[in-house]
Structures are given as C-alpha cells and as structure tokens.
Image (cartoon, grey):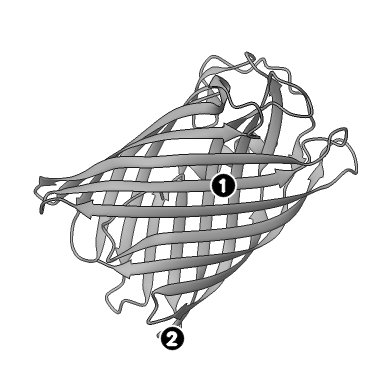
Amino acid sequence: MTKKITLLAFLIFGTMSYAQDYLDVVKATYHSATLGNVDNDEETDVGNANVEVYFPLPLTSDITLISGFTYENTRLSLNNSISRTNLIMTRLNLGVKLDHGNKWSGTYVALPKFASDFNNIGDNDFQMGGLALLEKRYSSKYSLKFGTYVSSENFGTTVTPLIGLWYKSKNKKFYINATLPIRADANYSVTDHFSVGGNLLTSVKSYNIASQLGDGFYVQEESIRFSAFAAYGLLDDSLIVRARVGFDTTDYGLYAQGDDVGVQVLTFQVGGDDRTRLNSEFEAAPFVGLDLIFRTGL
C-alpha cells in the first residue's frame, strides 16, 4: 500500500511531442538495480534494456506521420522459487500529428504491443494502447500539453491522464521536457557539450507469463525510476552519452490470468482490488544507468 501511495503521488504531478527544437530519433538505455523483498532477505538483480526508434515523416505543413518501434527487456527473478525471467515488450508506434491552427496541434498514436516472456505466444501476449495529446505552443520558449493514454492490460484497462510542459530558458542553458506522468527531463548546460540534470520515468503495464510456472499467469509492473545524470554531447551534439544514478521503486506483482481489476486510472482501481498476489512485494533500491541518444534538430 505504501508503494501504491508513492507511485500515485508521482503520477498526479514523455511519450511523443515535437514542440521542442530537437527530436530524439534513437534512444538506447540500460540500468541495473538489486531489489530486495519486503517479506524476507531475498534479493534479485534487475537488468532493464530499452530501445526506442522514431521516424516522423512530414506530408504537408500541417500533417506529419509518426512511426516507430519500442523494445524493452527486463530480467529478474519474480520470487526465490523460480529462475530468472525475461519480461519483454515490443511495441509499434503508429500515428499522426496534425496542426489544428491557432498554435494548437494534436498527436494521435496507436500503440499495439506484445508483452510477455515470449514463450508460447498467444492472445494474452497482445495488448492495444492509444494516445491522444493536444499541445498549445505559446512561444518558441514554452508550450503546454494535455491528453490521455489508454491501454488494455492483463489486469484490465489502464487510463492515464497526461499533462506536459516544454520550456527553454532565454539563454538556452536550461530546459524542461515533460509528459507527466510518463516521463520528464530537466537539463542544465554547464558548457557547450556538458550538462547535468534530472530524469523521471514511470510505467504501469503487464506481461503474460507462460514459462516456468506454466500458462495462466501475468506480471503487473508499476514503476517509478528517478535519477540525476551527467551528459556529454559528441558529433556536434548529435550523439548524447548520459550516465545516471537514481532510485528504482519498481514492483512486479505476479497474478493468475483472469484475476483482474477491470478499469484502473493511474494506480487507482475503480472497482477495488481483491486479487490474490502470488509473490512478495519488492523493495525500492538505488540503480545506475547509461543512455545513448541520437538527436537531430528540427
């Protein structure tokens, strides 16, 4: 319950947005943590690798097609009675950005994905998501974003309201790029190529499990990872290398398929949660990470 309250607190306060003057075309990240167990002294090493690729294609001055791909692999032991498991998510990002006029634009994206341990692929491995994000650009220095992310999951349907901000200071040394509660970056340029800042990443998603335990189980991931980073730009700042150290509060709950909650808004289950959890809750822990970002100007 304490972890739920912590996660909700962060969620109340980035997906895809092109209000800023750059675009991260390719982003590869890796981080490692050792998570404890609230019920005993057992620990599990958690390695998380993530690759995001985006291909915006302008058709006219008012219409841009959006395509991309996301791959994520988390390796850990769900409890001390089974060996390590790979939780894999592969997702297509297919949509459009429209200029609605009067400095308003809209981003609308379909997000079909497979999320499981990729053993015996079936219907429970496939989930469908969607994003709608309206953006108001007030100046070249800042814009605001409002929207919703919806996804079918093994535990039910998750609904996430979105609010975001892009801001760049007059001297161009400080910027914030946030689409909350999904992600946020704050960055300050110390020199032309070296910067420091903070980063927040959250997620609520599920994975079908069909190995080791047999068919009929799923994992619900509820995650907050926040970190401080130091970054250096290479190749005229088209390649950003970023080292991170932070705190990982991710929990991986194991449940039987069919034991669901219906609709979940942020971390709140609309109809209540009377599921039977099959593993112990994980404890938060420090983590270290590395990002490689290929960035292009707009």
Q: Quadrant of the N terminus?
A: top right
Nearest to the observer: residue 153 or residue 122: 122
10 Å crowding of disc 1: few (<14), some (14-19), many (20+): some
Mark in the foreground, 2 or 1: 1
Residue found at the far right of this picture: 41
Q: Which mark is residue 191?
A: 2
Q: Amino acid at mark 2?
A: Thr
Residue for point 37% across, 53% down: 54
Where is the C terminus found, in terms of image quarters?
A: bottom left
The residue positioned 73% from the left and 55% from the top of the image is: 33
Q: Mark 2, residues whose alpha carbon is within 10 Å: few (<14), some, or many (≥20)?
A: few
Residue beneath disc 1: 72
Quadrant of res 55: bottom left
CA separation, marks 2 and 1?
A: 32 Å
Task: State the residue in front, 155 or 111.
Answer: 111
Considering the numbered disc 1 on the image, is that residue within a helix, a strand or a loop? Answer: strand
Could you say which quadrant of the image residue 230 lies in? bottom right
Circle 1: residue type: Glu
Residue 274 at x, y = what percent? 66, 15
Would residue 65 appear left or right of 69 to someone viewing this image? left
| Residue 273 in view | yes
Q: Nearer the viewer, residue 220 or 286?
A: 220
* 243, above or below 75, in the image: below
Closer to the camera in the image, 287 or 214:
214
Image quarter of residue 247: bottom right
Asked whether residue 107 appears in the rendered view, the answer is no
Q: Position of residue 175 (x, y in %)?
A: 37, 68
91 sits left or right of 74 in the view: left
Judge whether 278 appears above or below 183 on screen. above
